[in-house]
Image: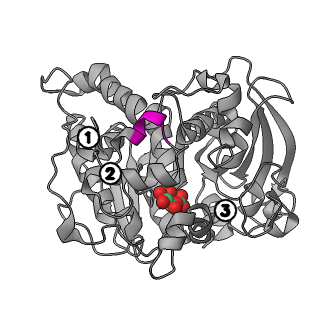
Amino acid sequence: MRAAIRDAIVGPSLALLCAAGTAAAQPAGANDDEAKVPAYTLPDPLRFADGRPVREARDWTEKRRAEVLGLFEEHVYGKSPAPPPRMRAVVVEEDPRALGGLATRRQVRVLLDGTEQGPGFEMLLYVPNAATRPVPAFLGLNFDGNHAVHPDPRIHLSASWMDDGPGVVGKRATEAGRGTNAAAWPVERILDRGYALATVYYGDIEPDHAAGWRDGVRARVGPGATGRFAPDDWGAIGAWAWGLSRALDVLAKDPDVDGRRVAVIGHSRLGKTALWAGARDERFALVVSNDSGEGGAALARRRFGETTARITATFPHWFCPGFREYANREDDLPVDQHELLALVAPRPLYVASATEDRWADPRGEFLAARAAEPVYRLFGKGGLGVGEMPVPDRPVGDTIGYHLRRGPHALTAADWEHYLDFADRHLRR
Ligand code: GTR
């Protein structure tokens, strides 16, 4: 899988330290032993900052939700700016008979300040021709450029900075990169099931390296434009998630897409991003986190696999600068990741793990989903429906879905089947 390769590339310290030489294995020094998980107490999502209990859905919607969101902004992902007032979308390419007639393809240039010279990104959209429009959609950022999602030769090659990988020469995409990430994006299957697919290369929003902000939206929009970041200013995950909301702005206006039925999906660091986007922006009707791990669905306090110390050292640009203060001090964090999941409530949420992806702490992801259930219950919504982790490849859950796929850290066609089934249940009612 491309993502596994990327782990080895983007996480050099991880690759170097990997005892077994694979991204799925645990680096030396990382805890891979359930018996060594420290005792911990999770913060209670159902208690206001002043200690009073949250008793009903209204307490959550009117007050507690904003408190929890504020804590994540202040301590984890940073504060994001408002939508840019002069944003404009231009359809730069369209084909009503794409993929042999299966879909309408649209490539949309999103100009964040309304100008060609300003920051922006390109969204690739496929709408199934056989389905009654407007259709529900999946929206997700991709790792390797829109052109890597499918071999379709008409997809524009990304021109943005790109880390080394298949088809990348001198940090730029080439023709050889076409379709190289197709295994993670079963486009025809998604279309056959009646969903549109929209995707954006995350590097268009901000290149994924420590100095990437200089060439991304954080240098042009919001407080980071001064070049100085306060402890609670947005990091790259904040920027990418904000970009997802801008993509949704555009998607919601597309006549072929039902803006009230857009699911946001992401894998790994982009799973963290999908969760933060879905937590912030309640227009996302459904949220999918695939193998998102530390800083995503996994509980930080377990310190299993990747930890706060490790992630802030390897990827200092992902979170708000203040998050670094919690390296080796997870118990002092005013939140834990079950509360990020709870911010999706009462909307449907799907968390998925993979058996070999121990670095992402599958059990910590499952337990976070379970600890989000009380918030769903406030709304009369069922959660996972099980107390213990299910056996591999057997999805569980009602409004919170979960599965543990057999295999490595990756987004696969098998994962998508479960997401499509879950979306059928929740977006087609
Ligand atoms: C790893 C990182 C994880 C995960 C992954 C990915 O190197 O430690 O947190 O985000 O990268 O995004 O592929």
Closest to the observer, 32 or 105: 32
Q: Earlier in the sequence, mark 2 or mark 3?
A: 3
Residue sitting at 84 percent across and 25 percent down?
A: 115
Residue sitting at 46 percent across and 82 percent down?
A: 20
Mark 2, Cα crowd under 10 Å, few <14 / some 14-19 / many 20+, is: many
Which amino acid does the dot numbered 2 rest on? Ile
Residue 246's place in the image compared with 311, above or below, is above
Q: Quadrant of the N terminus?
A: bottom right
Q: Earlier in the sequence, mark 3 or mark 1?
A: 3
Q: Would you say the residues marked 3 and 1 are in contact, meaning their CB atoms lie under 8 Å apart?
A: no
Q: Which residue is mark 2?
A: 400
Q: Which mark is residue 64?
A: none
Closest to the observer, 179 or 67: 67
The x, y position of residue 8, in whole percent, is 58, 69
Which amino acid does the dot numbered 3 rest on? Val
Residue span colored magenta: 319-324
> In the rendered structure, does residue 308 fall within the stretch colored magenta?
no
Q: Would you say the residues marked 2 and 1 are in contact, meaning their CB atoms lie under 8 Å apart?
A: yes
The x, y position of residue 254, in whole percent, is 70, 35
Q: Which residue is mark 3?
A: 187
Place residue 34 in its image quadrant.
Answer: bottom left
Q: Secondary structure at mark 3?
A: helix
Q: Which residue is mark 1?
A: 376
